[in-house]
Image: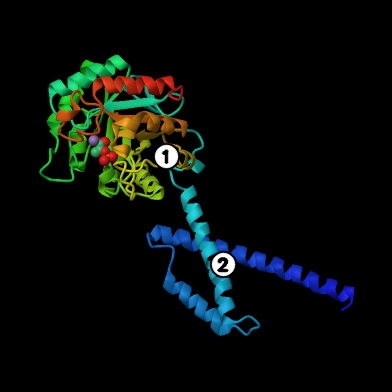
């Protein structure tokens, strides 16, 4: 074959490549348009039946030289690339996505306490609000230590219905009174959308617990109020599910959301859950929301809280949550994992001394 002939064929190949590129790009655009229509209709983007029909039609029209198998493989690749394109677009369009909002969201709580941004936040307090005395004792210690935000559960989602279920609204009142007396803010879990309205007077931040991360009606309901939300990662939730749970809240208008990694279920038994440190930089990269780490529930072990808190801060966490009880041995929930007041002071001092707590 002469060089002229070869050059001619190569030029023809370049031309066909160009045409193929134009056609697959045009095809991708049509797929995106279909995706937008499906999104409006609320139907799934992937339609295996339709994909099968398209492949069968292509195979039937195939005149060679490619085999039917090769045609299937080639077109399946094109189909899946188009579908991927839709999911990337979808991620980009999430309200919680950093791609959409480059700056860190900084939540300003009453008293100018900020979450996210330049300073770290320590959230501490009992697993459950048990009594006025217990709550006030912790509040006094936290104020003395310089903590600004106290946690305390009033509605407790317990594994057994026979275990202490929390004091309910009375617990929220006790928490609020103790917090106000010691100049603290409050975080408490709400498990039922019907309790939100009444709880607004008692909490500065509504906590959505790990067991309720998939409770979409609760997520929508907290999305409709004007109160910051602390959203815990579900026990077995992927980060994608976690991010979408936050999106449920934000899509209803509430933009003040903090995410908190609290450990996930794995086969590892030496800790109560497995603290997924990698969640911190991934969430910070993908979302613009503050990210905290609950060292208590993720580890369930008092002896490793200090290194775990340091690791969380080193990985970019905006804050730490830890459980503190005046007398953990007698606690009505999570007795084994709560710090007593002296232990908390040592913990907080060590975390601050690391230089990682800003
Ligand atoms: C809590 O923080 O009180 C709690 C119950 O934690 P989680 O939802 O992470 O289990
Ligand atoms: Mn607890």
Which label sits in the foreground, 2 or 1? 1
Instruction: Determine contact: label 2, label 1, CB under 8 Å.
Output: no
Tell me which image quadrant ligand 1 sits in. Answer: top left
Q: Nearer the viewer, residue 329 or 120?
A: 329
- Percent from the top left, x then y, of residue 22? 66, 65
- Residue 184 visible from this viewpoint: no
Residue at the farthest left position: 162
Q: Is residue 247 above or below residue 137?
A: below
Q: Is residue 129 left or right of residue 34?
A: left
- Percent from the top left, x then y, of residue 25? 61, 62
Name the disc covering residue 277, or none.
1
Report the residue marked by disc 2.
78
- Percent from the top left, x then y, of residue 257? 36, 36
Find residue 195 and report its image quarter. top left
- Percent from the top left, x then y, of residue 249? 34, 42
Q: Secondary structure at mark 1?
A: loop
Please give the name of the residue rendered at 18% of the width and 35% of the height, measured from the top-left corner.
333
């Amino acid at each position: 074959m002469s060089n002229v002939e070869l050059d001619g064929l190569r030029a023809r190949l370049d031309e066909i490549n160009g045409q193929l590129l134009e056609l697959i790009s045009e095809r991708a655009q049509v797929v995106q348009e279909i995706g937008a229509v499906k999104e409006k209709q609320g139907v799934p983007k992937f339609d295996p039946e339709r994909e099968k029909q398209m492949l069968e039609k292509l195979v039937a029209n195939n005149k060679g030289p490619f085999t039917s198998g090769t045609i299937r493989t080639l077109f399946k690749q094109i189909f899946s690339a188009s579908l991927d394109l839709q999911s990337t677009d979808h991620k980009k369009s999430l309200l919680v996505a950093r791609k959409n909002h480059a700056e860190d969201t900084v939540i300003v709580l009453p008293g100018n306490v900020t979450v996210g941004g330049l300073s770290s936040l320590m959230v501490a307090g009992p697993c459950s609000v048990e009594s006025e005395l217990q709550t006030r004792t912790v509040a006094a210690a936290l104020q003395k230590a310089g903590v600004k935000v106290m946690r305390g559960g009033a509605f407790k989602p317990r594994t057994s219905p026979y275990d202490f279920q929390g004091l309910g609204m009375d617990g929220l009142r006790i928490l609020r009174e103790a917090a106000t007396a010691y100049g603290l803010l409050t975080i408490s879990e709400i498990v039922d959308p019907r309790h939100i309205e009444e709880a607004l007077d008692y909490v500065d931040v509504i906590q959505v617990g790990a067991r309720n991360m998939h409770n979409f009606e609760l997520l929508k309901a907290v999305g409709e109020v004007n109160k910051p939300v602390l959203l815990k990662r579900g026990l077995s939730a992927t980060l994608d599910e976690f991010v979408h749970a936050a999106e449920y809240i934000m899509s209803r208008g509430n933009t003040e959301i903090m995410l908190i990694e609290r450990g996930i279920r794995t086969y590892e038994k030496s800790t109560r859950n497995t603290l997924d440190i990698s969640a911190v930089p991934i969430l910070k990269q993908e979302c613009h929301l503050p990210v905290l780490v609950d060292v208590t529930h993720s580890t369930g072990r008092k002896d490793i809280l200090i290194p775990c808190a340091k690791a969380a801060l080193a990985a970019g966490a905006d804050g730490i949550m830890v459980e503190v009880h005046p007398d953990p041995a007698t606690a009505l929930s999570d007795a084994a994992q709560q710090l007593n007041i002296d232990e908390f002071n040592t913990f907080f001092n060590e975390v601050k001394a690391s230089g990682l707590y800003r």
